[in-house]
Every structure is written in structure tokens, then in C-alpha cells.
Amino acid sequence: MSEGMRELWAEIGREIRSGRLGEVGARRNTVTMKTNEYEYYCTGKCNAPLPAGNGHGGIVYGGGGTDIDAGFVFLGNRSNGGQLLVLRTGPSGDDAYDPYIYDLGGHSSSAATLILKDKAASSSPTVLSIIGNASAIFVAGGDQADYWRQWHGTAVQRAVQARLDAGAPIGGTSAGDAVLAAFCNCALSGSVTSEEALKNPYDAELSISGRFFTIPGDAQPARTVNDMHFVTRDRAGRLLAMMARMLQDKLVNNGSNVRGIGIDERTSLLALPSGAVTIAGEGTAYFYEIDASTQRTCEKNVPLSVSSVTATRLDAANLGEQAFDLSTWRGSGSAVSYTFAIEDGTFKGGKDTPYGPTKVRRGAAR
């Protein structure tokens, strides 16, 4: 391992290892509030004020499935103490996240869940006050289209943005991961499979939305879209079709490369504001790039072709031996780098499949 790589891992690794255990098995204070517009649950010191001073920023990108302990410890440690708030939509839910997060430690007061049942909740003074008191925020899984329709352009979006501007770290899993990228894979017209997207990159159910939140630093790279459940649901074709559309539809400045981040289930990426990233969990994560000058065919009802895609894969099994830098878009250590192509809707590249040498998907698209 290079010295630079060693320093990078040390910086991120400290955030994971320094987490303390909470009151495991002990009696915990809880709070529950339910109205027609929202539900709020809290475990811990729920009335503690917002700590003085800013947080330290950072993002946890989660691929869905089983949550990763290290991600919540990372958020808590970078939050300057206070409340770690889980956001989700309704119509109902529970507090299952709260004792789990609280027992992991890494935060000083409480873990809470706020469920917004409809768009009307986005203007509730109580809802805005709860968000305003959050030291760290985590957007749960669900339907990212609901998040966009209910929160985008509302006071809730502005309240979350205010916390991010003050250094609060943020994370998300599955649908929550989709809304953290510079371009939102918000699926406003439905969910397309990779097979459908490769066959027709202008499929009616493939859509790309603009930025949801602006996250300070380099942890949210420009010109990038995310996808999740990546290998398990065979999402590479869908992500690459979105990237090609970003170029074809001139959603990025002329001459700019486009990038995509794909994260498999039971896997998280922990990103510092510097752009330094490591992986945690059990699976893999992928960093794709298409150069703006790359020859391609991206047309309605015509199979997608892209002459060259560059890729880097991180494997959680090699934790501590590899990393990725979002600011330079370059892997280090034992990160796997490779290239492949798409020709008439079919991947080309021999063993360098879209998931990299020797890596195969675990299940069919769903």
C-alpha cells in the first residue's frame, strides 16, 4: 500500500473506529409524536439543544438492503454531537432505526425518525423545527420519486439544505442514495430495467432530474448520477444509459465528462468533504466515466452504443487496502480499474464486464 493511500485510509478509518457504544441493553428515553401530517420518534436525550459549532460534513452513500453500521457511526462522529435524524415519507412507519442507531454510538444525544406523510407536512413549523435541530441527517429507502414530489422546492428541502450548509453530514440508502447525487435518479416516470434502457435509452420510464441537495466540498462530485442495488438487480445498463443521456441531452456543459456511481446492496461508501472515499459492508461499488468526446449512439428506439467506458471497482472484502478520490476520479491501492464498451445494446470487453474482471451479478433485475 502506498504512503498516500495509507494516509487516506487512516483519515477515514478513524471515523469508523472511534465510535462508542450507546446504552446497549439499558433503559432509554423515548419520545413519540403523531399527527395527520407527520410522525416523529426519538430515542435518547431528545430535548437536547443543537450543539454549538458546525459539523464536519461528509456523505454516506448506501446501496440498499441491510444497513451498514459503519455508515451511522461515521455520520455520528462527523456531526459534532446532537441528534441523528432519519427522514422518510409515509403514509406511516416506525422507530426501528432509532434504537439501532443509538446503540451504535458515535453521537452524543439521540437518534430520531421523522416521517412526512404528504406534501402538506413540508410546511409544518414543528417539522421544520425538528430538521433544524438535526446534527446529522439520513434519508431512508423508499421511493425517490416521492421524495422529489413531496420535498423538492419546499421548506423541508430548504431546512435540510441549511443544515448541510452548517456542516451537518448526510447519508442515504437506496432511494435516499439517489437524491444525494449531483443529478437525481428520481424515477419520476417509473423504473426501467438495464435491458430496456440499453435497448432504448429514451425509454419513457428512464428519467434524470436535477440536483436535490447541494452538499459542500468534493464528496458530491459534479456531473454524476447514482444507482443502487447495483449488482444484485443488474443496474449497470440503466446507469450507463442515464450517463449517455446526460451527454446527449446536454445536461452538462459541452466538453465535460459524465460520471456514475453504482453501489451494491449491503454496501456503503463513506465520503469525506475532501472527496476521499472508502467502502464498508459486504459488496462492491463502481465508478464509471464516459468522456464527452467518446463516440456513441444515443437515440430514441435505437440500441445504445458507447465506444469506451472507464471504470473502477472497490470491494468491501479489501477494506483498508483500497480507496477512491472523487475529486480526481481515481482509485488507489488494490482498486480494480478496467474499460469496456457497449455495442448495439450489448456489453463488449471479454472478462471486463460492466462489473469488472471475474465479477458477476448475483441476481436478475427486479
Image (cartoon, rainbow, N blue to C red):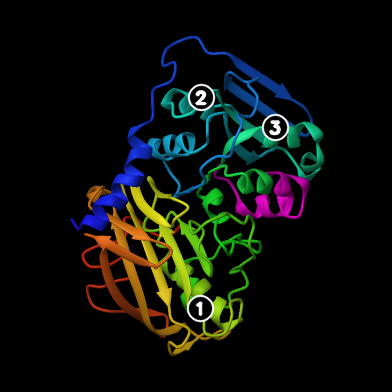
For badge 1, the amino acid type reads Ala
Alpha carbon distance from label 3 to label 1: 40 Å
> Which contiguous range is marked in magenta?
139-159
Residue 335: numbered disc:
none
> Mark 2 sits on what residue?
108
- Vertical position of residue 93 compared to residue 187: above or below: above
Residue ID at (48%, 68%): 238
Examine the structure image and report whether residue 140 is included in the region drawn in magenta: yes
Left or right: 338 in relation to 269: left
- Nearer to the camera, 303 or 274: 274
Examine the structure image and report whether residue 176 is included in the region drawn in magenta: no
Q: Would residue 281 be visible to someone looking at this image?
A: no
Q: Residues within 10 Å of mark 3 (few under 14, many from 20)?
A: some
Q: Residues within 10 Å of mark 2 (few under 14, many from 20)?
A: many
Left or right: 7 in relation to 44: left
Label 1 residue SS: helix
Q: Position of residue 204 (x, y in %)?
A: 63, 72
Q: Main secondary structure of the magenta part?
A: helix
- Vertical position of residue 347 compared to residue 358: above or below: below
Label 2 residue SS: loop
Of callouts 2 and 3, which one flags the residue occurring earlier in the amino acid sequence? 2
Residue 130: numbered disc:
3
Alpha carbon distance from label 2 to label 3: 17 Å
- Nearer to the camera, 319 or 91: 319
